[in-house]
Image (cartoon, rainbow, N blue to C red):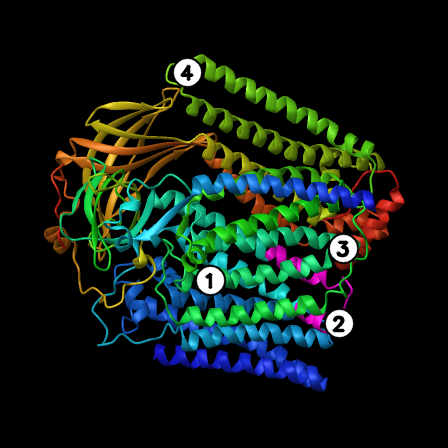
């Protein structure tokens, strides 16, 4: 039953999306409003069919329908209900169905949002969205069908969900990532529609910006959740290994980050048009490319998927989009002449440009590193593997420099400015940041001199120390400068505004923030990034790792923690058995905690062991304990212990980044307030948010010397 | 405009040279030659050179000691195999017949001394081809037949030939 339902609804999705392509083509050629409506309604129809398909698969999982290979491979009777539903996207076919479902829903939402848009560009955009939907429905129908029957009939029980995936982080990670990937289809479709139809204005950018921020938000959340999962589940003490699959999700993130900034320069000043075209196409392409390299088996990854027909489907799709994007770029090259030259490198556009160049260089580095094993195998070269050290050495310094531009960018105005103005903007944050950095440097040098002995300090070791501390100082300076620049600029604007109103500080600040979500959401995102940088720098520069071999009751130290091995026992739970050690950890204040690292074996996975780390996290560092092995019934146990400074800031920074970008696309919250107390212009701006940017530009000009850069 | 072009040129050169410096440093630390086992066995030129090898863990002479942080095993390619002496934490998915990557160098005695052992987990997302879906494994069966991490695991080989 579910098999029929699933297959019929998949066929329905194929038909409807192909119908949408045909209708869009007809609308373009015949200029018929009926054809436009047909294309529109077909795009609304596609998610309905995918919902039925997905519903059928979920139903099969809930009912333990092991007659389906997919259900039998990823579920079992004893699996908790939540994991049974999440097993939907545990494998290749289901995860592609999830992607298709999300893409169809987002396409329908986007089309719903284009209420009053008509014309050639609209028809082409509809056609592009339909094309993407058609690709996924055909892929699912013919190459990744999740409704294949188990040969030889249904087994009594399924294989079960891979233990490593039985984690809340892993349930939410793929859907978030796919919302991001699928979301980037929409800006691409709009851009193709607008450019092919021959429009050269910049108004359409306001249509894609919301989608860009939306997709970026989910991609960021997805990537960071993946990192968090790797940290708590994989047990090697880190969160990012530069594995091809991780890189595949980072690549579109980097180009989308560049795009979100350079698009502002196009919106407000008509610059970077060609560059934006390239970035929109690249972001979409990289989402597909990442999927291609990881699922086709062309690149060796720890996340190996078996080679399959899916790779060929993606390859053809990728090839078509790449070639058409290049063709579009060449065709429209002269039409996309910039309306302004770059006035000065020291301006907001200058910072955008510098940041963009760095982001694109980072993208290229990661891209080359990821595909290099493939390239080096072809020629007469010796085959090379690129290790994480390569990326850490090359990408990390670029990231630090990028953070510097990030710190400066938001406080610089658009267009030409005087150096005096910059000096005034940056004097206070700059001096404060220097003082804080000096204090940090002095403090850590004092601490270091006070407790280390220099007897075993080799040249190599001291050089490493110098390097580490140099980068630490740079990161502290950049992050504090970035944070302070935003805070100082904000408090200045609030106090300037407060002079004109009779409101109190809080209300003035709230109104100011609510008046310009994009600007302040963007700054909040930057603050999140600064926190993240501090966390990443601290944890990668100053991690301590130690293997402790302890007898029962014995203790040892790592950094300023005392670790005591208290006991070990075999425990049994519903779907796994585990050997669990109990370890007492005393921190520097003498406060004790118990940690319970385990080695588990899940039912149905007799030949695989799963290490469960135990960790203790506070605002400045994590202590992370993994049980490596034991001897003589646990008389002796071996632990791998990490002290990871700054870890919490990585997660806090990520949350702030996600909140900041969510704030960017939230509608205004205090509109009613604003209407009561503010001028008619604010009301207009609230009514016509698309033109808000330009009005702000005018109002800045009108206010003359009040330093408040344009809405971001 | 000429002035700004010069500025751009200088800026571009600065970026390019900084990038070159970074890439050179990155390549020195982060690139390693990578081969299948068959390609390096009994080839003198590979001796002493840092390498990454791909292969499957052999079922014979498989000795793993989790508490002692070491493992000795054969890394098997299509036709040839190489003796590996690894020291470090044993990854969860390390077991005979699984695909692994080791990094280290071939010693004078022809043994590969590895300090890095990475497991690949195709089963993470997909059951291997031909691997049938399990029947009804109970906890009892499982613990009864295997004691891979029985509490008496000692320095002696677990010698677990599957």
Q: Position of residue A260 (x, y in %)?
A: 65, 53
Separation of marks 1 and 2 at Cα, in angstroms: 32 Å
Instruction: Look at the magenta stretch and give its main secondary structure.
Output: helix
Determine which of the numbered discs, if any, sits on residue A291 in the image.
1
Quick one: A587 or A22, which is closer to the camera?
A22
Left or right: where B125 falls relative to A108: left
Question: Which residue is denoted by mark 3 in the rendering?
Answer: A271
Which image quarter: residue A277? Answer: bottom right
Separation of marks 4 and 3 at Cα, in angstroms: 55 Å
Label 4 marks a residue whose chain is: A
Separation of marks 4 and 1 at Cα, in angstroms: 49 Å
Question: Which residue is denoted by mark 4 in the rendering?
Answer: A452
Crowd tier of the residue under label 1, counting other residues whose Cα lies within 10 Å: few below 14, some 14–19, many 20 or above: many
Question: Do marks 3 and 1 share a chain?
Answer: yes
Label 2 marks a residue whose chain is: A
- Looking at the rendered structure, the secondary structure element under dot 1 is helix
Q: Which residues are magenta?
A: A192-214
Left or right: where A29 falls relative to A471: right
């Amino acid at each position: 039953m579910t098999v029929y339902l699933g297959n019929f609804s998949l066929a329905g999705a194929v038909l409807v999306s192909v119908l949408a392509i045909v209708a869009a083509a007809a609308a373009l050629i015949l200029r018929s409003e009926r054809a436009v409506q047909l294309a529109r309604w077909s795009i609304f129809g596609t998610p309905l069919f995918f919902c039925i398909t997905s519903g059928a698969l979920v139903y099969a999982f809930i009912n333990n329908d092991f007659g389906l290979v997919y259900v039998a491979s990823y579920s079992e009777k004893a699996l908790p209900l939540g994991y049974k539903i999440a097993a939907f996207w545990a494998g290749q076919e289901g995860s592609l169905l999830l992607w298709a479902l999300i893409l169809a829903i987002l396409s329908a939402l986007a089309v719903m949002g284009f209420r009053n848009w008509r014309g050639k560009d609209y028809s082409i955009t509809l056609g592009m969205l339909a094309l993407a939907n058609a690709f996924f429905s055909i892929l699912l129908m013919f190459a990744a069908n999740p409704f294949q029957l188990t040969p030889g009939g249904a087994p009594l029980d399924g294989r079960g969900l891979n233990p490593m995936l039985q984690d809340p982080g892993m349930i939410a990670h793929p859907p978030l990532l796919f919302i991001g990937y699928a979301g980037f289809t929409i800006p691409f479709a709009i851009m193709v529609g607008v450019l092919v139809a021959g429009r050269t204005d910049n108004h359409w950018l306001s249509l894609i910006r919301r989608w860009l921020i939306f997709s970026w938000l989910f991609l960021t959340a997805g990537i960071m959740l993946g990192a968090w999962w790797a940290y708590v589940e994989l047990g090697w003490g880190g969160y990012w290994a530069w594995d091809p699959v991780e890189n595949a999700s980072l690549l579109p993130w980097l180009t989308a980050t560049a795009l979100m900034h350079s698009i502002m320069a196009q919106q407000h000043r008509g610059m970077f048009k060609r560059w934006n075209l390239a970035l929109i196409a690249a972001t979409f392409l990289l989402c597909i490319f990442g999927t291609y390299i990881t699922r086709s088996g062309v690149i060796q990854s720890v996340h190996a998927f078996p080679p399959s027909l899916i790779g060929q489907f993606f390859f053809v799709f990728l090839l078509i989009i790449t070639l058409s994007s290049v063709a579009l770029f060449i065709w429209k090259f002269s039409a996309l002449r910039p309306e302004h030259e770059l006035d000065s490198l020291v301006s907001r556009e200058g910072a955008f440009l510098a940041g963009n160049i760095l982001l694109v260089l980072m993208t290229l580095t990661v891209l080359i590193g990821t595909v290099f094993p493939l390239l080096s195998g072809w020629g007469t070269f010796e085959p090379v593997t690129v290790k994480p050290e390569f990326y850490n050495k090359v990408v990390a310094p670029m990231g630090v420099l990028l953070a510097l531009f990030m710190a400066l960018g938001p406080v610089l105005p658009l267009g030409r400015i005087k150096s005096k103005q910059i000096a005034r903007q940056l004097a206070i944050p700059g001096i404060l940041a220097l003082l804080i950095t000096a204090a940090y440097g002095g403090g850590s040098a004092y601490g270091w001199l006070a407790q280390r002995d220099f007897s075993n300090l080799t040249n190599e070791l001291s050089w490493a120390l110098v390097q580490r501390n140099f980068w630490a100082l740079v990161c502290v300076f950049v992050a504090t400068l970035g944070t302070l620049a935003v805070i100082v600029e904000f408090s200045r604007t609030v106090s300037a505004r407060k002079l004109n109103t009779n409101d109190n500080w809080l209300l003035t600040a709230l109104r100011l923030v609510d008046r310009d979500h994009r600007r302040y959401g963007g700054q909040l995102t930057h603050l999140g990034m600064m926190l993240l940088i501090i966390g990443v720098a601290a944890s990668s520069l100053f991690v301590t790792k130690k293997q402790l071999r302890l007898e029962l009751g014995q203790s040892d130290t790592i950094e300023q923690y005392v670790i005591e091995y208290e006991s070990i026992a075999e425990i049994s739970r519903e779907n796994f058995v585990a050997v669990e050690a109990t370890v007492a950890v005393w921190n520097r204040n003498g406060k004790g905690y118990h940690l319970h690292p385990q080695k588990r074996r899940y039912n149905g996975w007799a030949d695989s062991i799963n290490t469960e780390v135990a960790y203790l996290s506070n605002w400045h560092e994590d202590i992370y304990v993994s049980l490596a092995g034991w001897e003589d019934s646990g008389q002796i146990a071996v632990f791998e212990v990490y002290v990871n400074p700054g870890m919490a800031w990585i997660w806090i920074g990520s949350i702030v980044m996600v909140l900041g970008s969510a704030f960017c696309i939230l509608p205004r919250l205090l509109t009613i307030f604003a209407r009561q107390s503010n001028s008619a212009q604010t009301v207009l701006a609230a009514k016509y948010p698309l033109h808000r940017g330009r009005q702000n530009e005018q109002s800045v000009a009108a206010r003359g010397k009040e330093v408040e850069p344009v809405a971001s | 405009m000429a002035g700004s072009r010069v500025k751009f040129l200088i800026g571009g050169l600065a970026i390019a040279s900084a990038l070159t410096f970074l890439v050179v440093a990155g390549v020195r630390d982060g690139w390693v030659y990578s081969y299948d086992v068959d390609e390096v066995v009994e080839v003198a030129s590979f001796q002493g050179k840092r390498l990454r090898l791909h292969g499957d863990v052999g079922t014979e002479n498989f000795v793993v000691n989790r508490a002692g942080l070491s493992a000795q095993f054969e890394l098997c390619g299509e036709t040839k195999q190489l003796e590996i002496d690894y020291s470090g934490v044993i990854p969860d998915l390390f077991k005979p017949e699984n695909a692994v990557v080791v990094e280290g160098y071939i010693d004078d005695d022809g043994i590969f001394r590895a300090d890095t052992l990475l497991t690949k987990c195709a089963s993470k997302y997909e059951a291997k081809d031909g691997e049938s879906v399990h029947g009804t494994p109970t906890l009892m069966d499982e613990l009864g037949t295997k004691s891979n991490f029985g509490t008496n695991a000692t320095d002696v080989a677990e010698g677990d030939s599957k």
